[in-house]
Image (cartoon, rainbow, N blue to C red):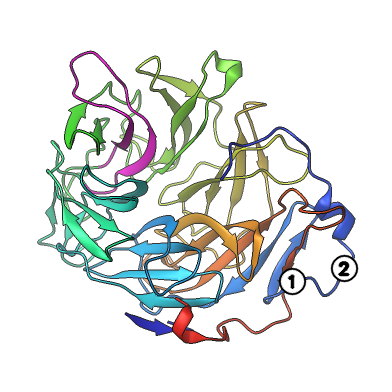
């Protein structure tokens, strides 16, 4: 395992006051990590760059493999690269390669297939070859990386080959003879022709994989075909008459709109998609992740970060299912499209959560980057007055004890 220094309990409903109370502190640990922008809602900090700059990657968070500490952020794909970042030690590490190299894949964390203990990072679909180059081959391929064995598993392929799809983890749709049980990996949207196709046709296809039964099944289609959208699972919006955990499809490129703002919500209990409130900023090639909400909002938010319309964007917005509404947050310091996102503990401040944004294109044409930035979100105090905030004065990439870091 190569290392380089460059290289959750259910959401609650309590409002947090920690950021506001600590806004004047100058030396909290997270603010020692090169903060770029800070408000009462949170703070962006710069983390070490990915060892391998790349775009149109998958992102996920899961337990670190042996030799690394805590919960890791995983950057998956573009060729066969898998790299992980350990917030506990503030370093990246290169991990075993995907069996099938590809870009534009869908990724999520879910229980491993039957017979394998623990959680796995799933890599589904995508395309071989250079991003947007002639000769791309769109894939049905599905693989899972076991954080316990530090190895990839080959899974049954998806039913529909596609690139630019998104994945999320939620309870399975059970019954109806689908062969699904327990927790499922949902894969939704995408396009069947790759970026180099003369005509790109978005898909509304939705499939779910059940690790418990090692089975794929086809589910009700999206209402609006899309690819390069955001995808996440989070509490359902009760205001729409839904309950439990839902799957969210956010923005992307549609058949007649290159920068969708529409949001769809899938309820596994109802086995149906419903319309959610539009995102304030329509965009494609964005990333999404679920994390605690910032100050002043009920907890359990879906964050939509980056993307592009006629330009590359740093837009950062959060949706809270409790109010069924969106808020605009401090912009991503480095605008990017085709980036990955995941939620994990903040660098060196393990009691706080951060939304990580990593990799992507800095321009519409190219400019691949390994930039990694994290938005620090307050956590419930461990003791009275005990919330710590990201600390931007400490140089990134100087994590000690490299043998225990990622």
Q: Is residue 195 above or below residue 129?
A: above
Q: Please give the name of the residue rendered at 62% of the width and 37% of the height, measured from the top-left corner.
A: 11
Residue 40 at x, y percent in the picture: 81, 54
Q: Is residue 376 above or below residue 47?
A: above
Based on the displayed image, in which of its 4 quarters is residue 321 positioned? top right
Q: Earlier in the sequence, mark 2 or mark 1?
A: 2
Q: How many marks?
A: 2
Q: Which residue is mark 1?
A: 31
Mark 2 Cα-neighbour bin, 10 Å: few <14, some 14–19, many ≥20: few
From mark 2 to mark 1, how far is it between C-alphas? 9 Å
Q: In the image, which residues are magenta?
A: 163-190
Relative to 45, is 222 on the left or the right? left
Instruction: Provide the secondary structure element on which disc 1 rests.
Output: strand
Front-most of residues 105 and 90: 90
Q: Which residue is mark 2?
A: 25
Residue 253 at x, y percent in the picture: 36, 42
Instruction: Provide the secondary structure element on which disc 2 rests.
Output: loop
């Amino acid at each position: 395992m190569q290392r380089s220094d460059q290289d959750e309990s259910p959401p609650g409903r309590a409002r947090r006051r920690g950021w506001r109370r600590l806004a004047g502190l100058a030396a909290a640990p997270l603010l020692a990590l090169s903060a770029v922008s800070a408000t009462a809602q949170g703070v962006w900090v710069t983390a070490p760059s990915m060892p391998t700059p790349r775009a149109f990657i998958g992102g996920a968070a899961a337990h670190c493999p042996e030799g690394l500490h805590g919960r890791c952020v995983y950057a998956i794909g573009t060729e066969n690269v898998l790299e992980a970042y350990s917030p506990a030690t503030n370093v990246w590490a290169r991990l075993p390669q995907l069996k099938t190299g590809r870009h534009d894949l869908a990724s999520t964390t879910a229980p491993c297939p039957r017979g394998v203990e623990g959680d796995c990072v799933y890599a589904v679909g995508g395309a071989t070859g250079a991003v947007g180059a002639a000769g791309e081959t769109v894939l049905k391929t599905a693989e899972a990386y076991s954080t316990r064995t530090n190895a990839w598993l080959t899974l049954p392929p998806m039913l529909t080959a596609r690139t630019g799809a998104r994945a999320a983890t939620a309870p399975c749709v059970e019954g109806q003879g689908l062969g699904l049980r327990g927790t499922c990996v949902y894969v939704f949207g995408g396009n069947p022709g790759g970026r180099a196709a003369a005509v790109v046709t978005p898909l509304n296809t939705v499939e779910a994989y059940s690790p418990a039964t090692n089975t794929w099944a086809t589910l009700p289609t999206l209402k609006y075909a899309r690819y390069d959208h955001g995808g996440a699972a989070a509490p359902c919006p009760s205001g729409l008459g839904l309950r439990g955990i839902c799957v969210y499809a956010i923005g992307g490129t549609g058949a007649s709109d290159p920068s969708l703002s529409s949001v769809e919500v899938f309820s596994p209990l109802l086995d149906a998609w419903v319309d959610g409130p539009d995102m304030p900023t329509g965009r494609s090639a964005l990333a999404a992740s679920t994390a605690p909400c910032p100050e002043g909002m009920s907890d359990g938010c879906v964050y939509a970060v980056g993307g592009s319309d006629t330009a590359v964007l740093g837009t950062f917005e959060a949706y809270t299912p409790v109010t069924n509404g969106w808020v605009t947050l401090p912009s991503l310091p480095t605008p990017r499209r085709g980036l990955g996102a995941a939620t994990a503990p903040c660098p060196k401040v393990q009691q706080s959560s951060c939304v990580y944004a990593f990799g992507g294109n800095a321009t519409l044409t190219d400019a691949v980057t390994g930039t990694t930035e994290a938005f620090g979100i307050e956590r419930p105090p461990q003791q009275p007055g005990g919330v710590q905030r990201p600390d931007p004065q400490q140089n990134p990439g100087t994590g000690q004890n490299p043998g225990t870091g990622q």
